[in-house]
Image (cartoon, rainbow, N blue to C red):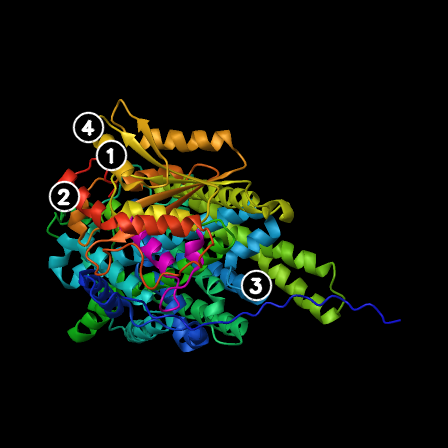
Amino acid sequence: MEAPTRPQPIMTKCTVKPYPRPWTPRNADVRFDVVRDFADRVKRLLVGRPVPSRALGETLLPKRIALPVFASDALSSVGYAPDEVLITLAVAGGAATMVSPWVALAVVGVLVVVVASYRQTVHAYPSGGGDYEVVSTNLGPNAGLLVASALLSDYILTVAVSVSSGTSYLAAAVPWAEGHKVEIALGIATVLALLNLRGSRESGSAFAIPTYLYMAAIGVLAVVGLIQEVTGTLGRAESSAYEILTQGGWDQGLTGLAGAFLVLRAFSSGCAALTGVEAISNGVPSFQRPKSRNAATTLLMLGTIAALMLMSIIHLAGAVGIHMVENPATELLSNGRPLGKGYHQDPVIGQIAATVFADFKPMFYLITAVTGLILVLAANTAFSGFPVLASVLGRDEFLPRQLSQRGDRLAYSNGIIVLWLGAVAFIIGFDANTNRLIQLYIVGVFISFTLSQIGMVRHWTRELTTATDPGARRRMHRSRAINAIGVAGTGLVLLIVLATKFTRGAWLTLTIMAVLCLVMSRIRRHYRRVSDELAISDLHDARVLPAHVHAIVLASRLHQPTLRALTYAQSTHPTSIEAVTVDTGDGGADRLLDAWEEAELPVPLTILDSPFRDITRPIVNYVRSVRRESPRDLVVVFLPEYLVRHWWEQILHNQTALRLKTVLLFTPGVVVASVPWQLGLPGQRHIHHGVRARTAEGIIDADVAMRRHVDSHLSHLDQHSSSSTGGVDADPQENR
């Protein structure tokens, strides 16, 4: 007895075809193609040629390019952080600025803690989620949303602050730019967006030279200035001759609780130098292999260079006697009198360069130029970090999924455009004023710092519960201790920032974060609801065919688009078919009925009365009534429509078909089928094309018989339609 054979599985053959070339009719109007080709050429000029997905590995960054890409924000903070420290302390008079080196030293201490903490993060979480991934994994999704909103707002403010500060340096060298700071800042932000749309490697290569030139210029300035100080040849800054007007209540200087509060406020302003450190943890996937080690090395280089530059500038600012105030026209005095609006206050680095290189002006202009340039390019850090974070949030369905898609150049183009729009809004809203923008700046970043370090402490604690290797446990204990110190340092700074900057603008940042959290939670809820509704609960029930198919063909006149729609509807072999028109009282329905009876079409015509001359509502109500009478049946609505050749011709036609489709698409159990008729194309005088199949004698085929009957009356119908309507565009129910 033979063993029963097992049933063989049904094999489906799948063939992958190459991407087809777009088809264009031979004699079609080419104006649309010309416009499309022109737009494509402009896009290629701005963005570049598309890059295939297999070239993604070629866009990874080596350390020499990753440093200017991800570290330019933190390094450029030297350009405005010293200014903010001195301006804040100047409230209590010129003597108060003497504590600025101690403030800078405290900032450097926090920088060391943050860098050490984030080196643990890039090793533990190399996927690129950064603070968001750390907090979401260890503290829950709600805390992750808070961090994400903080980082998103911080990235937007990074672009606005950096670009605005860069325009201030430009105004120091070119006075004309002072009255056009907003326009210049918007132009610079736009150029940065376009460069990043071309890809990270190209943008990194473009920014590497000015970044390294900036580091070299600041290094030369610091070395020469320190040598002059040691040799006693260091001069005094121009502003050192001016007297600072002490504000009311600060006659006693930095004394008491108020003085301590002012020092803390200066410290919080100086902590702007820490912004941008987190960008490396978000951008780990952009590094070459080994990604984590290269990211950690770049982070260490960033921290070392930023600390040396900040301390050198603060020290030299005190050595040359720089006086910085918020309103120099009224708060700087010369011989007891305010300087007035004609005085322009140069930034700290500009004043130091003018003093150190008083006898060599080209070096002064070089340092001023590269500092302004690096401040502008610092925004590139945000253009690198924001799209990556947005893509992660889009992947997790907290932001639109479009943000997780790469563009033609393998960059997250949608995220870059969103960041650009947000920066433009802040630049315009705050008139490109750096002092006003910086009050909003560092709140979000320290919220993310603190929560991230708490998450890392919890991460190492959880890892220690399962680790058994003594060496691994020692490394985990060391990492946890570093992150615990990070929690204490960043948490303290966060409290200081909130206490000293809340009324000066930090409340706006907190409000924006709350709105972002609400929006992202709503987006997540929407995606979950859609997923639940689209899930298949019963595969068998989902595949059950409808009991009947009822076809409805909308007709306004009896012309070729209507006949084509009738033919297409019959070709689907529905259970029942009917044509529907609306009587608006203008006689159009009567003329259609006469033409319908004369043509002897085997499809019943239903006329809907519309006493208020509305076309859309009667049809929609009728379709819904058919649906209600037979809930298990499928209703297919065929919409005949013709497509005009020129865009301006749309104005000459009403849009009934568009309105009908918009409404019917939201009706359950209704399928809308558009039957297009393209005007201006040859060969459309007849409904059917090619050789029609014949039916053998003796075989009754109602569809074939109907098509033969329609063909026999087609020429007569064309003449009748032209004579009765007087043209193609005479019917008020025309739906194009």
Query: Looking at this rendering, what residue extends furthest in the top direction?
Result: 611
Which residues fall within the magenta stretch? 400-426
Q: Which residue is mark 1?
A: 594
Q: Position of residue 96 (x, y in %)?
A: 33, 50
The answer, for residue 88, to whether it is visible in the render is no
Provide the secondary structure element on which disc 4 rests: loop
Mark yes or no: residue 282 visible. Answer: yes
Callout 3 amino acid: Tyr
Q: Tell me the quarter of the image containing the N terminus.
A: bottom right
Neighbour tally class for label 2: few under 14, some 14-19, many 20 plus, Cα within 10 Å: few
Tag nearer the camera, 4 or 3: 4
Magenta stretch holds residue 405: yes
Instruction: Kindly report the distance in space between the C-alpha atoms of the residues bearing marks 1 and 4.
Output: 15 Å
Which amino acid, by three-letter code, is at mark 4?
Asp
Q: Position of residue 413 (x, y in %)?
A: 36, 61
Instruction: Tell me which amino acid carries mark 1.
Output: Asp
Q: Is residue 490 left or right of residue 434?
A: right
Question: Which residue bears the numbered disc 2?
Answer: 727
SS majority, magenta: helix
The CA distance from mark 3 to mark 1 is: 76 Å
Q: Which residue is mark 3?
A: 125
Q: Which residue is mark 4?
A: 586
Earlier in the chain: of badge 4 and badge 3, it is 3
- Whether residues under marks 2 and 3 lie with C-beta atoms below 8 angstroms apart, the answer is no
Residue 121 screen position, x and y as percent? 55, 62
**Membership of 359 in magenta stretch:** no
